Image (cartoon, rainbow, N blue to C red):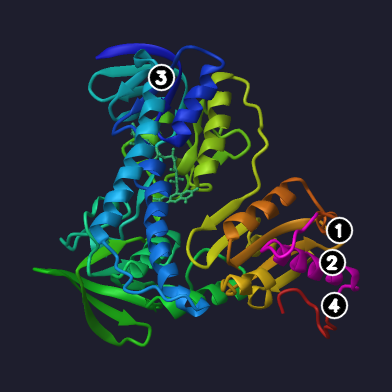
Amino acid sequence: MHEQEVDVAVIGAGSAGLTAWRAARTHTARVVLVEEGQYGTTCARVGCMPSKLLIAAANAAYEAKRASALGIHVQHVRVDGQAVMRRLRAERDRFVQFAVDNTEAIPAEARLMGHARFLAPGRVQVGEHTVLKARTVVVATGSQPFIPPEFKDAGVRLHTSDSVFEWTRLPASVAVIGTGVIALELGQALHRLGSRVTLFGRGTQVGFLDDPGLASLSTSLFSVELPIKLRCEVVRVEQKSNGVALRLRNHDGDEWQEEFEAILCATGRQPRLQGLDLQKAGLELDRKGVPRVDPQTMRCGDSAVFIAGDASDERAVLHEAVDQGRVAGDNAGAWPEARPAMRHVPLAIAFTEPQLAQVGMGWKAMQGTDYVVGSVSFSEQGRSRVMLEDRGALHLYAERGNGRLLGAQMVGPRAEHLAHLLAWSLQQGLSIEQMLRMPYYHPVFEEAVRTAVKDARDQLRRPPPPIEHCDDCTPGV
Ligand SMILES: Cc1cc2nc3c(=O)[nH]c(=O)nc-3n(C[C@H](O)[C@H](O)[C@H](O)COP(=O)(O)OP(=O)(O)OC[C@H]3O[C@@H](n4cnc5c(N)ncnc54)[C@H](O)[C@@H]3O)c2cc1C
């Protein structure tokens, strides 16, 4: 076994790992990048990019059919599933090639192939060929689909987001297990492309919004277009010659069977940490086996290990992987100085229709703060009605007293753009009054933000509601 001494070992050549490598390299030349699989990143191969390519085709089909509501009749909309998947893969491969080229631009002597695992603090074995003696290590090993045990052991051909983009044609029918972002994005796209799709979820709501009003609004809006069965569990799954049979049970205990050509398991993702032998690195792990991390430095406890990207189980989205990679790599390279970095405000988007977005702290995290909710419904919003995209609502939260924006959630049109406006306002620390002083063109979707901001301003001007009289305010009674 070859022994190599380095200053920084980065494990994982995904978006977080590549950024970490470059950041560490600004401090020292002795940085090595370890990868056990293919170069190309999850984002480009099986994540952000192929999913958005599928959605682009699906929305084109949907728009063509929906145009009749505007008086435009498109005859015979025909989805050529093979052509859809061909374009998806061709464009996907282009994005992957950029990522591969980017990785291969790193000098060959700074790259190692093989599975990495800790032997001891500061000692990492790569494959069966190298032991790295590293001053610091950045773990950037990403995440993987979580497969519930009832599916894992069922012996059926199960698809996840890791395999759907390899389909060369669209299945006639797909059971989508899960109601989170990936389930909604892929399920709605397949439905719009003509597959018979049903989403099955154990919970009562879809998507990721935790503002109760918007969570239930999202569920009802998506249920209008898509067959969604909630509070429902899969009792058994069986392989058939032409697909799969699902035995299902609802919350009333009723059982029934449904058959589909394909089954797509979209029941969440989990950090890919098993097989790393993290306990040998002397790290403190939480219940899920994830190292405890300082989100300002990305350092794990008081160790010389840093973590970045989906592996950190913090905010599993691309721009955060890149941010965390930069912070982790910078601090690993500058070791032993671990400088706290400014992190961006939380921002999450689902590319469904209507889109979902969350900016800033979630609704649950905000409880206990004195805040008002400025809201707007898209059903009366000018541009939304013009474009026939008038479904949904936006809530923005502002702190009573200083009038600062705290966050926002929305289900509605163009959330990917409105959410940026709100995230930038939040990051700048703008107050509701300052947001009102910004320009708003007419007629645009952004005017909905102004309506919600005005609503928040009106509420901030009103005196706070009186504290309800309480005869016996003994705590705990
Ligand atoms: C279907 C889907 C759609 C998505 N859409 C979006 C979106 O629209 N917007 C968005 O912001 N995010 C989206 N995401 C999330 C985004 O793709 C991820 O947050 C991001 O790619 C994570 O990057 P990473 O560097 O942490 O992990 P990865 O890119 O997965 O990199 C981890 C690397 O580590 C390697 N590795 C793992 N273990 C070891 C080991 N022991 N030794 C050596 N190498 C190892 C892996 O092989 C892999 O190459 C989506 C994800 C999915 C699955």
Q: Is mark 1 within 8 Å of ligand 1?
A: no
Q: Is residue 263 above or below residue 303?
A: below
Q: For the residues labelled 4 and 1, say whether their Cβ atoms are less than 8 Å apart.
A: no
Label 4 vs label 1, nearer the camera: 1
Marks 1 and 3, how far apart at CA? 48 Å
In this figure, which residue is indicated by the disc labeled 3?
106
Q: Is residue 59 above or below residue 347?
A: below
In this figure, which residue is indicated by the disc labeled 4?
467
Q: For the residues labelled 1 and 3, say whether their Cβ atoms are less than 8 Å apart.
A: no
Q: For the residues labelled 1 and 2, say whether their Cβ atoms are less than 8 Å apart.
A: yes
In this figure, which residue is indicated by the disc labeled 1?
433
Marks 4 and 2, how far apart at CA? 21 Å
The residue positioned 33% from the left and 54% from the top of the image is 161
Please tell me the numbered disc located at residue 457: 2
Quick one: 15 or 442, which is closer to the camera?
442
Q: Quadrant of residue 422?
A: bottom right
The residue positioned 46% from the left and 13% from the top of the image is 30
Q: Is residue 110 above or below residue 56?
A: above
Quadrant (top left/top right/bottom left/bottom right) for the C terminus: bottom right
Magenta part of the chain: 439-465
